[in-house]
Amino acid sequence: MSLPRIAAWSARHRRLVLALWAAVLVGGVLCAPALFGRLSGEVGSIDGSDSERAAELLRATAPSGDTIVGVLDGLPAEDLRPEVDRLAGELTALPGVAAVATPWSDGGAGLVATDGRAVAVAVTFEPTPAGDDAVDDAAALLRDADAPRAVVGGGPLQDEEMDEQAGSDLARAEVISMPIALVLLVVLFGGVVAAGIPVLVALVGMAATLGALLLATAVADVSVYSVNVVTMLGLGLAVDYGLLLVSRFREEKATGADDDTVLRRTFATAGRTVAFSGLTVAASLAGLLVFPDDFLRSMGLAGMAVVLLDLVAALTLVPALLALWGRRIRPARPRAADGGFARIARRVRRRPLAVVVVVGGLLAVAATPFLGVRFADPDARSLPAASESRQLAELADARFAAAEDVDPVTVVVPSALSEAEAAAYAGRLAALDGVREVSVRPDTPGLTVVDVVPTGESQGPVAMGLVDDVRALDGPAGALVTGDAAELTDYQDALGARLPWMLLVIAGATTVLLFLFTGSLVVPLKALALGALSLGASFGALVWVFQDGHLGSLVGTEALGGLSITTPVIVLAIAFGLSMDYEVFLLGRIAEEHRRTGDSDLAVERGLQQTGRIVTAAAALIVVVFAGFVAGGFSPIKQIGLGLALAVVVDATLVRMLLLPAVMTLMGRRNWWAPRPLRRLHERLGLTDGPAAGSPAAGRDVEPEPVPVPAPA
């Protein structure tokens, strides 16, 4: 069934369509509580990796529980001792507590602040359900300590704070972005009715995706952070698709055609563009499915689900709403063909090579900071300043010598070496570059466990290099390496090994879809090149802001020394999809004009004039959505939000308004080239709608500007 027929059917059966989508909305809302209870907070582990296998051996043979730390601050250590002794007794008596370390117990070295006016209490739990249950009780006892200040965090408490912060950022982003987006839509369309249609599409698309994610949790782990992706993409793309469809509806309505004809023309043109755009974005997100990490796969599944459900809603719910409210939506006002975007296209056409060199060079320079990118797993610095775990980490770094401890690179030998063999192996490990200390763990039955403490940070370059050196060393049979640095190394290696496959999926799917959309083989290759430029600039900015700390105060961050390892991959998948979203918006109109006039330069000029405002408005709206996430408190979410916002700004301005017309001018008629067999295939498939199906609006320059008097709501 063609898109105009789907739209006509949805309009005729609008009550049924509206009832079905209302049921989806209610069902999705009802699914939300159950979904949030089944989401996983696990990030950055690869099943079957060396580090994971070593960790499993340790858990099975010599399990150890989690640890939290409480710092009592504001009095001399000796004055705090009676309270610490009381706490230690009560904590030790809790079921599930394995050990309590204080400055006056064995293993309590370094638990007194360097200024003598604070002490730390470390509580280690049994690796059992009872130990898990004891965490909150122990934390409550520490927080209620009789001291001027008590700060408690670390371990499972820090993990909980990260998950809660992600949910809080989601709610804050919705509160910030939804009202602003609605106001911008009302201003753009001049009426609440037309503005409300994209918002309704967003709501039902996100609700449907929550239901789909709940079903997915029955067969796989789904990350808690996937809901943030659903919100960002669901709201942004629904607004984009609703904006394009309603804008074209207003243009066609201005021709004076009857309602049925207006609806069919809208979905024969803008509907086709939305369909290809949605498929292209979904194909880009499908690249995340090639990774072995449940976190990234769930991000890809969540993103694809919300894109495709937004697409279905746009192609069925929007025509039903237009049939219901279309008479209350005012036609667009005709504008002169010689508008601002047409003038930009003509100026670019005068010096296309200069534009390509200057703008392309600027974007290439902006990408250079990414050459020095470093990666790290999120730590306490990723949380906002008000977070207890971050306050604890900052307090420990500033005032406790024990904070200088570095997590070791741990070697696990799956056999019990003799004391002499273990000592000899430890000596060879100690001779490696970057080693500060080596020790053999006692009480590991059936295993030999050697901790190698590196100089520098736990996940710094020295520790990462040491992991490779230990693995390259000729050691006991079956020796495995784990620890923070080893886990990060394995994760980076896994991403690096699968990244070419991700790029192949994205490039292949984009090439096929854009060829089917335009009949050209040149257009998809150009789109890939331009998309890479905007992505590179965005990646460079992320390193400059979050890793190096430049202008960090503007987005509420400090220099973190590295990016969250999953940030570039997620930004790549989403931002490239959005880049193709705007590419399809522009190409749809340019190709339409080219089929009508046969003049490539004129088609670019008119296509840019007719869609420039729509692309600009769509970009502004989606940047508002992403900016809501930048305003959150969890650094990995802020990084994704800022990366996507910058990618959209660059793509919708420098790339689509300047580079695209410049490159298309240089290519001329070659823009539409394809080998003869592919041209015949495209013609046989019949995927090209004629010159807008005879639509008078195809030859008019009509813009979705606000009208002087708003349509009645």
Image (cartoon, helix red, strand yellow):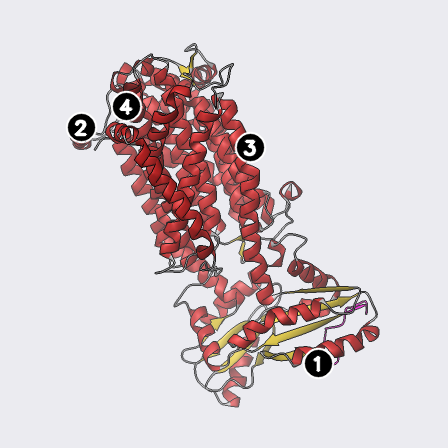
Q: Earlier in the sequence, mark 2 or mark 1?
A: 1
Please tell me in which quadrant of the rendered image residue 686 appears. top left
How far apart, in angstroms, are the residues tagged by discs 3 and 4?
31 Å
Q: Earlier in the sequence, mark 3 or mark 4?
A: 3
Which marked residue is nearer to the observer: mark 4 or mark 2? Answer: 4
Which marked residue is nearer to the observer: mark 3 or mark 2? Answer: 3
Q: Which residues are magenta?
A: 102-118
Residue assigned mark 4: 264
Instruction: Confirm whether the magenta stretch covers residue 111.
Output: yes
How far apart, in angstroms, are the residues tagged by discs 3 and 1?
54 Å
Indicate the position of residue 405 as horizontal and vertical percent values. 65, 69
Indicate the position of residue 401 as horizontal and vertical percent values. 72, 69
Q: Earlier in the sequence, mark 4 or mark 2?
A: 4
Residue assigned mark 1: 89
User: Along the horizontal axis of the image, is 675 left or right of 27?
Assistant: left
Q: Earlier in the sequence, mark 3 or mark 2?
A: 3
Q: Is residue 91 above or below residue 335?
A: below
Question: Which of the numbered marks, if any, corresponds to residue 683?
Answer: 2
Please tell me in which quadrant of the rendered image residue 591 appears. top left
How many other residues sit within 10 Å of disc 2, few (<14), some (14-19) or many (≥20)? Answer: few
Q: Considering the image in quadrants, where does the N terminus appear?
A: top left
Element marked by disc 1: helix
User: Along the horizontal axis of the image, is 685 left or right of 623?
Assistant: left
